Image (cartoon, grey):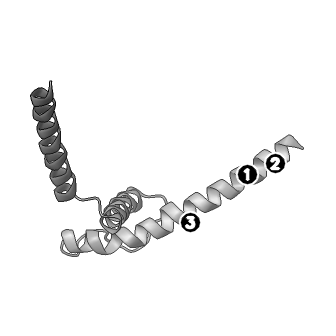
Amino acid sequence: MEEIATFIFRFIGCVLSEMILGTFFYWLGWPFVKLAILGNYPQKGWKENSREEIYVACVGIVVFAIAIMVALGHSAYNNAFNTVRSTHWTRKSYALARLLA
């Protein structure tokens, strides 16, 4: 019984990972790769389990991660601004503590 459950979970995992990684991220990354390389790469459409597919899917993952970060408001400007602001208040509270001591 345990072997059958393991087989079923592996099958579901393989199907889901192939659908998500192989399809969604490939088609998400495809226009960005075409734009960056001026239409020269990927060369002949969909190639199952090729390096081109993996490279384009990786670009899709990066694009997806950047889109999520932008949607959630994580940007370099916000992080730098918050760091400077927290450092500024830390210095003021340290100066205030020295005056009160």
- Tell me whether circle 3 and circle 2 mark residues in contact (CB < 8 Å): no
Nearer to me, 9 or 22: 9
58 displayed left or right of 6:
left
Nearer to me, 19 or 95: 95
**Number of the label disc, if any, that sits on residue 75:** none
Quarter containing the C terminus: top left
Residue type at tag 3 = Met
- Tell me whether circle 1 and circle 2 mark residues in contact (CB < 8 Å): yes
Q: Residue furthest right?
A: 1
* Secondary structure under the numbered disc 1 in the rendered image: helix
Mark 3 crowd level (few <14, some 14–19, many ≥20, 10 Å Cα): few
Image position, residue 70 (x, y; %): 30, 66
Image position, residue 2 (x, y; %): 85, 41
Residue type at tag 1 = Phe
29 displayed left or right of 17:
left
Label 2 belongs to which residue?
A: 5
Label 1 belongs to which residue?
A: 9
Question: What residue sits 31% from the left and 71% below the top?
Answer: 43
- Tell me whether circle 1 and circle 3 mark residues in contact (CB < 8 Å): no
Residue type at tag 2 = Ala
Mark 2 crowd level (few <14, some 14–19, many ≥20, 10 Å Cα): few
Mark 3 / mark 2, whichever is N-terminal: 2
Question: What residue sits 43% from the left and 58% below the top?
Answer: 50
**Number of the label disc, if any, that sits on residue 19:** 3
Question: What residue sits 38% from the left and 71% below the top?
Answer: 28
* Total numbered circles: 3
